Image: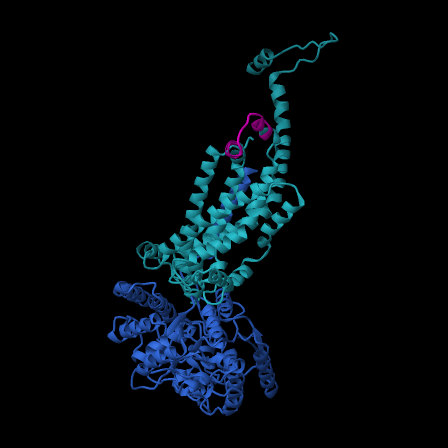
Chain colours: A blue, B cyan
């Protein structure tokens, strides 16, 4: 019996090694041949890229667990389904961004159950685009009659070759939120320049004895601050960082001075911890202002018992402050057939048309996708939000490196250690050099 | 003739007890009769063996499918350049292995090993020592002690993710209960999770709080199995409590300790959820354990090829340590008592 068992085990082991072997493994995919990113999908010649020629049901995976938002999506899908009879959209809540990413990775690996269209976190677009799993959309957009999406927002969803891969949907960006009631009473309006910001922090601290501004451990917000204050992207052109640039070093050292003096604080060890701490501190009046995502604005304005003001950020150069594209966008998967992709694009443009995008912005405090969106009704419900949402044209793309997120996390972490005093001043140079080395390795490896 | 000579040579006469002569039986005839019986016995033996084999096959198949097959696939992935999102991959030989050994330092792999080992050693030390102490203290069959044992074991019922979420707030530097109590006692706030030197010890503390009850229970069961004769004999000889513990209780608990060491070691080395929820590997990779790093590499960076190499090395490390522990156990641990 032992002999039989041994033979059986050996056979199974050998089978497992050879069963899925082969030098290259390719999926079916719509067009058969693998594409390099940047090339337009080789469409079936008989089919117009926009036209859905056969009735099709498509799955739309999204990450909105909030009942109101999920219901809104369901109602828009029902409207869309009722307005025509070729495409039936089935919205499915999957989970947060990581859950959607995992499910998509699993479906792609299994070559089965790949959805037609999903929301994904904007920073993932580059990664997905470089892997060739999402459909480039320039040829689709070219046929769109009412293409008034914010150009800078769309640029933020292009890859390094300039090809568009996603449609803005639940776009957000880092911003500054401040206690307007307090600042008005002190006669210290929220500053617009970095030099004014440093003086403002000191003045608020001296007037109240409390922290003026709370930064957060978050690669998104740090990225925005670097961009606005120094005018340069710390990750340079995406192949080598510019962390040793004087302006960057000076900004980081300024931050440390502000934090060590007590004028500012640097909160959290992970994104969740930082947001919770900041909101708690802000609501208790322990900080006068802090950095957060624009999607929080509605919640904050409605919950605080004082007047809240908002701003895109502070600028250290002559340029207006900007915010970098984050939040959710819509991507269409290359794996599916052309008819399905056409259907997905139709749905995506319907979901983000001026009317729906306006309603979505008013209800969720995410940036409107189109220039023709009318969102003034939002300011009646959320007074103070105009400081951010009037500037949807100031959303810009992040660095195009596929490892941008990982690299900025390294930077944000190093900045946090330094400004909180975990790294001595004397060790800053060595620490910052190591940080640059680590980031450069990440960028080179991408 | 030869045949006749052979038959005559092997002719034997058997006289049975009643005196009558039995028919003469030649050796060759007996051998022939035996040969005709053997195939039947061997066939039956083979049939029984095959039936037993068939009964075991489903279980073995499942084990191979869920354990060995994934391991084989892991080895195969480590020889490819597969990014989970890409449709194509090719075999690149030992490129990923070269990457592992040349960039171990800069890719935080060494750091993750170090953090995992520190966490494991500290966690093991606390749960085994404190678990043993609690078992010794509460080894009495009274209602009040039973209640105390239940209280100590209760954290084990709570899912680790729930524990992690609760402790995130308990250890919050600005609004947490722990720092509030410290403030009342006149101490300053402790950066439980926001300091890179402190965060790992906070995780050890939280995981140990949850794990002590289980170890205590195992030790208690083992103690119930120690014969009272040893203690009575020691009492008669006038041994002190410390001597009784050192020369009787501890050696007799050696098998249990060995069991807990092995099982808890493997479980601690595989820690993930508490790190993911409480610190996400930070601050500054100070709590980035190996499994968390593997998860990031696979599902955030989609580099399953490289993650496979790290996973295989981790597996080999665990296997070697477990084997050494077993060997040590064979020499030092006496199961006979």
As rendered, which of B307 and A72 lies closer to the eye?
A: A72
Quadrant into which the C terminus of chain B falls: top right
Residue B232 magenta-highlighted: yes
- The secondary structure that dominates the magenta segment is helix
The outermost residue toward the right is: B18
How many marks on residues? 0
In the rendered view, would you say A291 is above or below A189?
above
Residue lying furthest left: A246
For the residue pair A404 and A27, the one nearer the viewer reads as A404
| Residue B262 x/y as whole percent | 49, 44
Of residues B81 and B150, which is closer to you in this image? B150
Left or right relative to A290: residue B167: right
Q: Position of residue B333 (x, y in %)?
A: 49, 34
Residue A252 occupies quadrant: bottom left
Q: Quadrant of the N terminus of chain B?
A: top right
| Residue B142 on image: x %, y % | 66, 43
Q: Is residue A362 magenta?
A: no
Query: Does residue B213 appear to the left or right of B121 in the view shown?
Result: right
Residue at 48% across, 74% down: A279
The segment highlighted magenta reads: B231-247
Work out whether B74 lies above or below B32.
Answer: below
Q: Position of residue B188 (x, y in %)?
A: 42, 62
Compared to A95, does A325 lie above or below?
A: below
In this view, the residue in front, A28 or B199, is B199
Q: Residue furthest top?
A: B19
Residue at the image point whose x is 31% and y is 86% from the top: A319
Residue A301 seen by the camera? yes
Say if residue A22 shows up in the picture: no
């Amino acid at each position: 019996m032992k002999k039989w068992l041994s033979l059986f085990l050996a056979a199974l082991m050998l089978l497992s090694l050879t069963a899925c072997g082969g030098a290259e493994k390719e999926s079916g995919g719509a067009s058969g041949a693998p594409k390099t990113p940047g090339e337009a999908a080789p469409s079936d010649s008989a089919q117009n890229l926009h036209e859905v020629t056969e009735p099709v049901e498509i799955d739309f995976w999204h990450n909105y667990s909030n009942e109101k938002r999920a219901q809104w999506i369901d109602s828009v899908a029902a409207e869309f389904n009722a307005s025509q009879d070729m495409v039936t959209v089935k919205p499915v809540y999957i989970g947060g961004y990581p859950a959607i990413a995992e499910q998509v990775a699993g479906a792609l690996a299994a070559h089965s159950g790949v959805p037609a269209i999903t929301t994904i976190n904007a920073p993932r677009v580059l990664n997905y685009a470089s892997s060739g799993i999402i459909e480039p959309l320039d040829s689709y957009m070219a046929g769109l009659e009412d293409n008034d999406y914010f150009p800078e927002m769309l640029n933020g969803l292009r890859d390094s070759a300039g090809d568009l891969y996603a449609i803005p949907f639940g776009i957000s960006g880092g911003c500054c939120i401040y206690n307007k009631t307090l600042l008005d009473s002190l006669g210290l309006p929220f500053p617009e320049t970095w030099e004014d910001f440093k003086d403002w922090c000191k003045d608020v601290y001296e007037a109240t004895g409390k922290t003026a501004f709370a930064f957060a451990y978050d690669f998104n917000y740090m990225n925005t601050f670097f961009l606005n204050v120094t005018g340069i992207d710390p990750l340079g052109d995406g192949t080598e960082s510019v962390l040793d640039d004087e302006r960057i070093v000076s900004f980081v050292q300024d931050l440390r001075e502000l934090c060590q003096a007590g004028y500012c604080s640097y909160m959290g060890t992970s994104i969740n911890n930082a947001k919770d701490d900041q909101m708690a501190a802000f609501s208790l009046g322990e900080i006068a202002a802090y950095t957060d995502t624009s999607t929080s604005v509605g919640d904050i304005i409605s919950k605080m018992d004082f007047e809240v003001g908002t701003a895109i950020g502070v600028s250290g150069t002559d340029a207006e402050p900007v915010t970098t594209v984050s939040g959710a966008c819509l991507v269409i998967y290359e794996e599916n057939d052309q008819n399905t992709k056409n259907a997905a694009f139709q749905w995506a443009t319907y979901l983000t048309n001026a009317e729906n995008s306006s309603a979505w912005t008013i209800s969720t405090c995410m940036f409107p996708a189109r220039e023709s969106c009318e969102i003034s009704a939002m300011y009646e419900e959320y007074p103070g939000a105009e400081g951010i949402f009037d500037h949807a044209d100031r959303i810009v793309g992040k660095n195009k490196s596929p490892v941008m997120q990982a690299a900025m996390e390294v930077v944000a972490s190093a900045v946090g250690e330094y400004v909180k005093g975990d790294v001595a001043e004397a060790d800053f140079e060595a620490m910052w050099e190591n940080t640059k080395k680590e980031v450069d390795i990440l960028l080179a490896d991408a | 003739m030869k045949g006749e000579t052979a038959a005559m040579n092997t002719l034997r006469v058997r006289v049975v007890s009643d005196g009558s002569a039995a028919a003469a039986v030649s050796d060759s005839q007996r051998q022939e009769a035996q040969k005709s019986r053997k195939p039947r016995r061997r066939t039956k033996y083979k049939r029984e063996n095959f039936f037993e084999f068939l009964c075991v096959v489903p279980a073995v198949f499942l084990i191979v499918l869920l354990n060995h097959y994934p391991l084989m696939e892991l080895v195969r992935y480590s020889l490819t350049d597969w990014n989970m999102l890409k449709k194509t991959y090719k075999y690149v030989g030992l490129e990923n292995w070269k990457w592992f050994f040349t960039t171990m330092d800069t890719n935080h792999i060494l750091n993750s090993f170090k953090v995992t080992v520190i966490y494991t050693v500290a966690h093991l030390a606390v749960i085994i020592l404190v678990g043993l102490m609690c078992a010794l203290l509460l080894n009495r069959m009274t209602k009040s002690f039973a209640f105390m044992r239940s209280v100590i074991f209760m954290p084990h019922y709570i899912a680790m993710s729930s524990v992690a979420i609760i402790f995130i707030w308990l250890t919050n530097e600005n609004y947490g209960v722990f720092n509030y109590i410290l403030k009342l006692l006149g101490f300053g706030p402790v950066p439980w999770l926001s300091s890179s030197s402190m965060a790992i010890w906070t995780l050890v503390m939280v995981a140990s709080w949850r794990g002590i009850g289980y170890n205590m229970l195992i030790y208690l069961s083992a103690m119930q199995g120690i014969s009272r004769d040893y203690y009575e004999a020691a009492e008669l000889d006038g041994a002190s409590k410390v001597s009784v513990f050192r020369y009787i209780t501890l050696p007799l608990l050696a098998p249990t300790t060995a069991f807990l060491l092995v099982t808890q070691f493997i479980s601690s080395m595989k820690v993930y959820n508490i790190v993911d929820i409480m610190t996400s590997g930070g601050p500054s990779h100070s709590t980035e354990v190996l499994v968390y790093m593997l998860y990031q590499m696979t599902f955030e960076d989609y580099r399953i090829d490289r993650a496979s190499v790290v996973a295989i090395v981790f597996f080999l490390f665990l296997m070697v340590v477990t084997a050494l522990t077993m060997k040590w156990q064979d020499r030092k641990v006496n199961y006979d008592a």
